[in-house]
Amino acid sequence: MCRSIKTLRPPVLPHEATPDDIRAAALQYVRKISGFRAPAAHNREVFDRAVDEIADATARLLATLEVRGAHPVRTPEPEPRPDGV
């Protein structure tokens, strides 16, 4: 559908989605389905409300998803140095 919307859950996203990530995806979605990149002044309120509602729903979804078989995102530990330091 909208190729510019990215998957926002680990391990696809290497970190937890930020509020900015979620809002950007919601904005892209509303732009796509409304057909407006930027709404006219008389549609601004409903456009912005839709973005807010979709961002809230997305945040709730990401907070409650259980991804089976996924490993927690972790930073690899550094290799030990040969001199033991």
Image: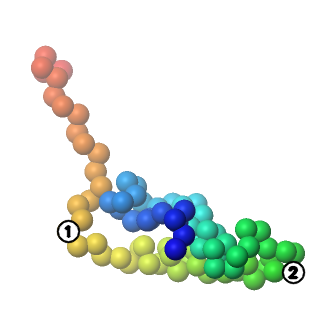
Q: Quadrant of residue 8?
A: bottom left
Q: Secondary structure at mark 1?
A: loop
* Amino acid type indicated by mark 2: His
Q: CA distance from mark 2 to mark 1?
A: 47 Å
* Amino acid type indicated by mark 1: Gly
Residue 32 in picture, x, y percent from top left: 63, 74
Query: Residue 42 has which mark?
Result: 2
Q: Is residue 84 above or below residue 35?
A: above
Q: Is residue 52 visible?
A: no
| Residue found at the very far top of the displayed protein | 83
Q: In the drawing, does residue 67 fall left or right of residue 24? A: left
Question: Which residue shows up at 28% across the image and 51% down it?
Answer: 74
Crowding at mark 1 (Cα within 10 Å: few <14, some 14-19, many 20+): few
Residue 63 in picture, x, y percent from top left: 41, 74
Q: In the drawing, does residue 85 fall left or right of residue 50? A: left
Q: Nearer the viewer, mark 2 or mark 1?
A: 2
Mark 2 / mark 1, whichever is N-terminal: 2
Q: Is residue 57 visible?
A: yes
Q: In the drawing, does residue 56 fall left or right of residue 70? A: right
Query: Residue 54 has which mark?
Result: none
| Residue found at the very far right of the displayed protein | 41
* Location of mark 1 (residue): 69
Residue 1 in picture, x, y percent from top left: 52, 74
Q: Secondary structure at mark 2?
A: helix
Foreground of the two, 15 or 30:
30
Q: In the drawing, does residue 38 fall left or right of residue 18? A: right
